[in-house]
Amino acid sequence: MQSTDVRRRGWDFGLTIITVLLLSSLGVQSFIGTLYVWWAQSAVPNWEQAGYNGYVALMNLLAAPQLVALVVVMGLCVPKRLFARRVLVTVSAAMVAAGLVAGFASESLATGVTVYLGLAALIQLAVVLLTAAGAAGPSYLTEGRLTKLGSGLLHLGFIVFGIVIAALQRSAFMLPVFWVATVLITLGTVMSFYANRFAVRHVEPVEHPIAF
Amino acid sequence: MNPYATYQAIEQLTTTLRAIGSVYEVLLFIAAAVLLLAAVLPQAVRWRGWFLAGMLALLLLGESVLVWFHWRLYALTEVYDPATGMLTGRVAVPLWVESEKLFVWAFMTALLGTAMVRHRRALLPGVMIITAALAAGASLLGRPFTQPLPQFLAQYVDYLQMTTSGFQAAMGAFEGMEGARQFYYNAWYMWVHPPLLFLSYACFAISFVATLQMISSRHSAYETTAYRWARLGYLPLTFGMLIGFPWALSAWQGDSWWWSGKVNMSLMMWLLYTGVLHARLYLRRAGMWRWVAALGVLSFLILVLTYITTYLVPGAHSYAFLPAENPLWTTLSTLLEGDA
């Protein structure tokens, strides 16, 4: 039992590190892009007319694999709360395969990503419902049912927001779905951060001094 | 509508504000210098909280004057459709645009700094230095009282002039002014998004000071304080940025706003703070605090750069193409571009 716990925490840590690295990498790209725009505006004549579209295309091209990787990692983070590691790999592979098939069949990356995120949203919804019901299944790094529920809602919100960006930007459903995502993210963040303030039964987090 | 009478009334209003501002901005700069001294001089330790409260009172006074100015401006800035002669509405300029941004940030930081409780004594000097820098910046660079709303007033005065220059010119100016009124100044988003971001900036400033304390003292309690302020700042930052999405889709329809400088930098700032909050989950691992601290410091530096980007990098959100009304911004820009 303890070794499963240790393995799960190692897996969680790996996913967290990959998430932080991907977020940082996108951040670095944004920074370099900003510096480039600043330089190009002053150094290249008529850059806004002649070069801006090329710059946007290059930024999209560079960001696409990172965003896809981020989406995949987010997808992996979702079923990890429900399934044991071996089943998790199978479920994750099936999700990626479903996304790829949908993407190739429709010849659209957005459709593939939407299908992948749709599956992730369904699993995350199950995680949220199980957490709310107090089921023992879902595993979290955090303590306390409200905190866990907040974390679940927050991640569900981001998945729904991903679907808005990938599939609904020109749809009549964009605004209502967007507001659902915003409420989920905001409520989830408040619950994740401040659950202890309004919990009936307090769960003290296990604190150890930082090893400086 | 009498364009000349409106112009005269606006001119009178801005002259009054400039007269108040010429005294107030000097006072603000002196108060910032005093606050800085109080932060660094050991003799002032016992009185630091009072110095910061004093700065807050001065900023509150200035904000009240700005509220009065905006309220009066709202009553004057009517927009008429030249085709029908009908009033389409008045311009409600938000209290945190153009030259007022640094002032609002200073106000929020002073407010939260005065209210903070945990590790108050240790964090006060850092918070005072940041508040002093922001207040000095507001009085020297922003100058919201002596150079009020340069972009808006230029556009509105131009609109007034065009109303007397024939139908075509009046129509063109009206479309520009009405678009700005509906999608920018009077948009609910502009009344919610910027103050949320300035609130988060103020929280992150205190978190930054606590992170520096943790690094220098190697005391884990400061890390908890830094985390508490970071999570408090993350909420308005995330919500504020999220609500920008549907607004940007409608206001900048057809523009490639996603990769513009300010959006890029804001995205990076949010990503980094998300990274900090994720990395912190593993704080108890050996050496992890270094990464969390480094990410925390880097995130705040990027926050400052994000703010400066507004004035340097053209694109959505940008004031970089404003006429060079403020020589200090021009000097700063030139220095940063390496032309000086």
Image (cartoon, rainbow, N blue to C red):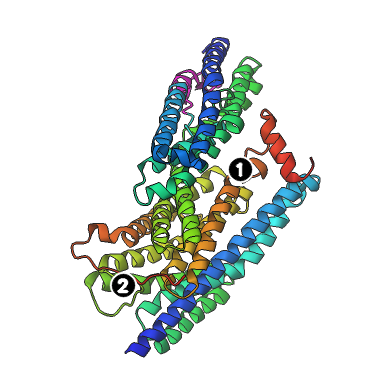
Is residue B4 toward the left or the right of residue A94 in the image?
right
The part of the chain drawn in magenta is: B71-92
Work out whether residue B306 or residue B202 is closer to the camera in this orientation and state it: B202
The N terminus of chain A, quarter of image = bottom left
Amino acid type shown at disc 1: Thr
Label 2 packing within 10 angstroms: few (<14), some (14-19), many (20+)? few
Q: Nearer the viewer, mark 1 or mark 2?
A: 2
Question: Distance between the Cα atoms at labels 1 and 2?
Answer: 43 Å
Work out whether residue A187 or residue A211 is closer to the camera in this orientation and state it: A211
> Looking at the picture, does residue B80 appear above or below residue B93?
above
> Quick check: is B79 in the magenta stretch?
yes
Is residue B315 toward the left or the right of residue A3 in the image?
right
Label 1 packing within 10 angstroms: few (<14), some (14-19), many (20+)? many
Q: Position of residue B291 (x, y in %)?
A: 52, 67
Disc 2, SS: loop
Amino acid type shown at disc 2: Val
Q: Position of residue B192 (x, y in %)?
A: 43, 41
Farthest front residue in view: B43
Taking the spot 52% from the left edge, 24% from the top edge, the residue there is: B27
> Looking at the picture, does residue A80 appear above or below residue B89?
below
Residue with the mark numbered 1: B310
Q: Which mark is residue A206?
A: 2
Q: Position of residue B56 (x, y in %)?
A: 42, 33
Residue A139 in view in this figure: yes
Q: Which mark is residue B172?
A: none
